[in-house]
Image: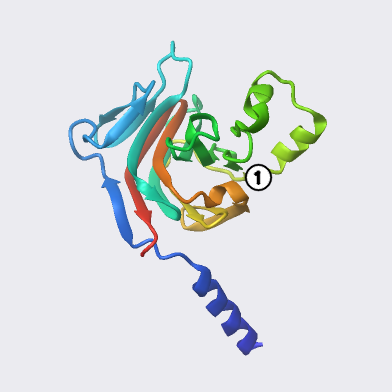
């Protein structure tokens, strides 16, 4: 029995990624966003040592605050977050490649965090796939039954219970074709899908839906080469 346990631990260690190379980190101690941050339809601000995620009331898109970098396959995002009120519905950690034209906005995969669930999704070969007009048919609510079934297989919902007005620590990792999530040091779950294995993820975003999410101690790392 001990032998089997040792073999299992060795196997797990062998497949664990080593995210030792820091691409970017920000503790938001400066006055305002640093120069590497990009934004899309965002009214977010850095205030009192945290990133305050804000979507303007008149905006037609959730606030996006992002970091660009040279393309990598295996990545780790770590960020502290707090849902300040019940107005904070969720936020997304997006992995994108804006040079990839096969999906809407170059979306590759994402983790969506709400007080009650974590949703993991392959966007590249799922709901944002432009192949054969799939994305447009989804937007127009014209999917076939088979397409709906296929898209359902491209995402996974994991139940959680996260308290409001308290800080939590999120870690999202891509390892090959797998997306893994932990919160406060505890594994939440993982999801495997082919699009996640995209070789050149080159943009990570925090997307706030719609307001009252605070972020701190953001870091982006890649697997050791």
Left or right of residue 179: residue 225? left
Query: Which quadrant: the N terminus?
Result: bottom right
Left or right of residue 41: residue 180? right
What residue is drawn where x is 71% and y is 43%?
A: 153
What residue is drawn where x is 31% and y is 59%?
A: 21
Where 9 falls versus 18 (above or below)? Answer: below
Q: Position of residue 154 (x, y in %)?
A: 66, 43
Query: Which quadrant: the C terminus?
Result: bottom left
Where 66 falls versus 202 (above or below)? Answer: above
Q: Nearer the viewer, residue 49 or 179?
A: 179
Left or right of residue 188: residue 153? right
Q: Quadrant of residue 144?
A: top right
Whether residue 167 appears in this view of the structure is no
Q: Residue furthest left?
A: 31
SS of the residue under disc 1: strand
Which residue bears the numbered disc 1? 156
Q: Residue furthest right?
A: 145
Q: Quadrant of residue 114?
A: top right
Q: Residue furthest top?
A: 58
What residue is drawn where x is 48% and y is 30%?
A: 105
Whether residue 71 appears in this view of the structure is yes
């Amino acid at each position: 029995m001990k032998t089997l346990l040792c073999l299992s631990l060795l196997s797990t260690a062998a497949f664990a990624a080593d995210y030792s190379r820091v691409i970017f980190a920000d503790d938001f101690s400066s006055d305002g966003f640093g120069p590497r941050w990009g934004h899309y339809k965002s009214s977010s601000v850095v205030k009192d040592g945290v990133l305050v995620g804000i979507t303007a009331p008149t905006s037609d898109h959730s606030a996006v605050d992002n970091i660009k970098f040279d393309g990598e396959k295996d990545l780790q995002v770590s960020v502290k977050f707090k849902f300040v009120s019940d107005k904070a519905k969720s936020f997304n950690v997006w992995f994108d490649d804006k040079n990839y034209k096969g999906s809407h906005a170059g979306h590759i995969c994402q983790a969506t965090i709400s007080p009650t669930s974590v949703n993991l999704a392959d966007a590249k070969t799922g709901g944002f796939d432009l192949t054969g007009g799939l994305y447009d048919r989804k937007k127009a609510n014209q999917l076939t039954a088979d397409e709906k079934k296929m898209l359902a297989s491209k995402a996974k919902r994991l139940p959680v219970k996260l308290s409001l007005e308290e800080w939590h620590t999120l870690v999202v990792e891509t390892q090959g074709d797998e997306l893994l999530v932990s919160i406060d040091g505890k594994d939440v779950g993982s999801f495997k899908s082919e699009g996640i294995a995209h070789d050149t993820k080159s943009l990570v975003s925090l997307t706030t839906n719609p307001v009252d999410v605070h972020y701190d101690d953001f870091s982006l790392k890649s697997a050791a080469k």
